[in-house]
Image (spheres, helix red, strand yellow):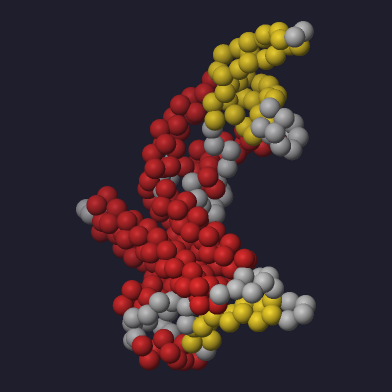
Amino acid sequence: MKLIGYNEERKNFHLVRNLTDAEVTNYEKYTPIVAEARNRFKLFRILGSNFNEWTGYISSLLNSQVRNDENDWLQLDRLLLNYLTCAYTIQEHFKASFQRRFRKDAVKLKEYSDFLDKLYHSAWAFAFYIDFRGYIQHCELGIGNYQRQISSTSVKINITHDSAQLLADSKEWKRCKLTDKNGTLDLVKLLEEFHHHMLKSYGGYVAKSFFPELFPAAKFYANLTSEVLKIGPGFRMVFGEGEPQKTFEEGKQQMQLQLKLVPNDLLAELGFSISPQN
């Protein structure tokens, strides 16, 4: 088996070297683990897609064209609801998974509970959006205020909610301890922070808990990718099986090789914002 750099744009490959026996063994060991993890953590990639839709729609508002503000408000509510529903599904899924996998391990279950409490305490945006999702389910949709202001030189949008109004509607803010002193809440900025913690803090924790083997696997593929990228920009690390087959067409030599797609940035491809060293 060979280590190869493949350039999709130019449709060519560069043979780097043969893989060592140890590298082939690692590849065979990690392949089923990666396959299972891809399926198990698919929810994180769905969350990422929902977040991209939300940010993409916000970007579309930053132009001077006349728009239907009522429809834009509706779409922002829809996109926020979709995102938070997915985030809630992820947490409910792994909460149940922890209880099944570690039902006889009280220490492990407490570790998970303590991790969440610590995250609520250290990341206010994370705690707020966990509570806010419940508010959206039981009280009102999430966008409290939407304004779009156009001048001759700029377009400014505000997507906010008011703390006092939220407290008047609901008392269920046990994680973030919301008070009226929190004032006007910038929902866009807070969701960026929440998403960061979903992918890095929460995602990192569940990845380590369920698939600790992913981290040495990610480092294994990252090292090989780094070696391939020394060829130059535009190359993807792939594996090749067998020897290249040479053919001639119209007097030109062609090389054919059976390529195997393998992860380059494994944790990112699974939807996480964490590094192999975390």
Percent across and percent down for residue 220 are: 56, 36
Of residues 97 and 20, the one drawn nearer to the viewer in this rendering: 97
The picture quadrant where one finds residue 261 is top right
- Counting labels gives 0
On screen, residue 201 above or below 248:
below
> In the displayed structure, does residue 232 sit left or right of residue 125?
right
Whole-percent x, y for residue 231 in the image:
74, 31
* 264 relative to 110 in the view: left or right: right
List the single residue furthest toward the left. 104
Q: Nearer the viewer, residue 250 or 257?
A: 250
Residue 223 shows up from this direction: yes
| Along the viewing direction, whichever of 64 and 211 lies nearer the viewer | 64
**Residue 107's spot in the image, x, y percent?**
29, 59
Q: What residue sits 47% from the left and 82% below the top?
A: 144
Residue located 40% across and 77% down the image:
141
- Residue 264: x and y, percent? 58, 38
Residue at 27% from the left image edge and 50% from the top image edge? 101
The answer to whether one can see residue 175 in this image is: no
Give above or below for 276 relative to 80.
Answer: above
Q: In what quadrant of the picture does the N terminus appear?
A: top right
Q: Residue 252 appears in which quarter of the rendering?
A: top right
Camera-side residue of 143 and 134 = 143
Which residue is located at x 46 percent, y 26 percent? 28
